[in-house]
Amino acid sequence: MSADRPDGVLFDVDGTLVDTTYLHTVSWWEALRQAEHRVPMATIHRSIGMGSDKLLDHLLGPERDRGEDDRLRTAHDGFFGEYWERLAPLPGAAELLRACAARGLRVVLATSAAAHEVAALRAALDADDVIHTVTCSADAEESKPAPDILVAALEQSGLDAGRVVFVGDSVWDVAAAAGLDIPCVGLTCGGTGRGELAGAGAVAVYDDPAALLSGLADSPLVSRRRKSPTDKTDTQA
């Protein structure tokens, strides 16, 4: 096996493989509004990808009344749960996972979703036959942008940080990967722009899983050669 070839790929799920970023945005907006916190959806969207504790710090400030955090989380979960049966994979998501597995790469879902959400996400993906390991929020002491969930994914899958690539859709994903010096491929399908992902340190940026699949042979998922996000092979129409 080439020293430049990864052994596995860690995938974020929400907004990366399953089209949930804006559903989480609306769910948090409803939960916050219910508690009389008026936070613009655009501000909430830019926080999606953090764990709920850091998200609430970011939106309401660290000096907020933390006594209502559990109520806010429960409200968010209730609103988001209404979408579970309608969750949809992003274009090419399952096909990308299968293509990675066919190349001998270990496929790991490094998600910090709550355990009760993971089953719904996996059902939407419908690719359990090629998924080696799946994490959940309970596996990490600290949420993104801390790298704890990636550490858990590596430990559970038996992979080494120096032999993997992470695929995510938010700047918080890029930051978490950077904490372990793991190259992060960014996808814009979660609503974060190409320039923002590249500026955060993504080694390549694609529109969605289908675009990454189309360019898989030349992507960092196949070769650990660090590439600029503006490389021609990484620029999708």
Image (cartoon, rainbow, N blue to C red):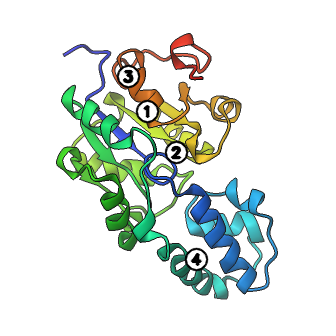
Q: Earlier in the sequence, mark 3 or mark 1?
A: 1
- Please provide percent x and percent y for residue 87: 44, 61
Amino acid carrying mark 1 in the image: Ala
Residue 110 to residue 206: above or below: below
Report which quarter residue 59 is drawn in. Answer: bottom right
Q: Earlier in the sequence, mark 3 or mark 4?
A: 4
- Separation of marks 1 and 4 at Cα, in angstroms: 30 Å
Q: Earlier in the sequence, mark 1 or mark 4?
A: 4
Q: Earlier in the sequence, mark 4 or mark 2?
A: 4
Local SS, label 3: helix
Query: Disc 3 or disc 1, which is closer to the eye?
Result: 1
- Please provide percent x and percent y for residue 150: 40, 48
* Residue tagged 3: 216
Amino acid carrying mark 2 in the image: Ala
Towards the viewer: 157 or 170: 170
* Residue tagged 2: 176
The answer to whether the residue labelled 4 contacts the one labelled 2, judged by CB atoms less than 8 Å apart, is: no
* Residue tagged 1: 210
* Residue tagged 4: 76
Local SS, label 4: helix
- Separation of marks 2 and 1 at Cα, in angstroms: 24 Å
- Residue 133 appears left or right of 170: left
Classify mark 2: residues with Cα within 10 Å, few (<14), some (14-19) or many (20+). Answer: many
Amino acid carrying mark 4 in the image: His
Number of numbered markers: 4
Classify mark 4: residues with Cα within 10 Å, few (<14), some (14-19) or many (20+). Answer: many
Local SS, label 1: helix
Residue 74 to residue 206: above or below: below
The answer to whether the residue labelled 3 contacts the one labelled 2, judged by CB atoms less than 8 Å apart, is: no
- Please provide percent x and percent y for residue 114: 42, 69
> In this rendering, does residue 186 appear at all?
yes
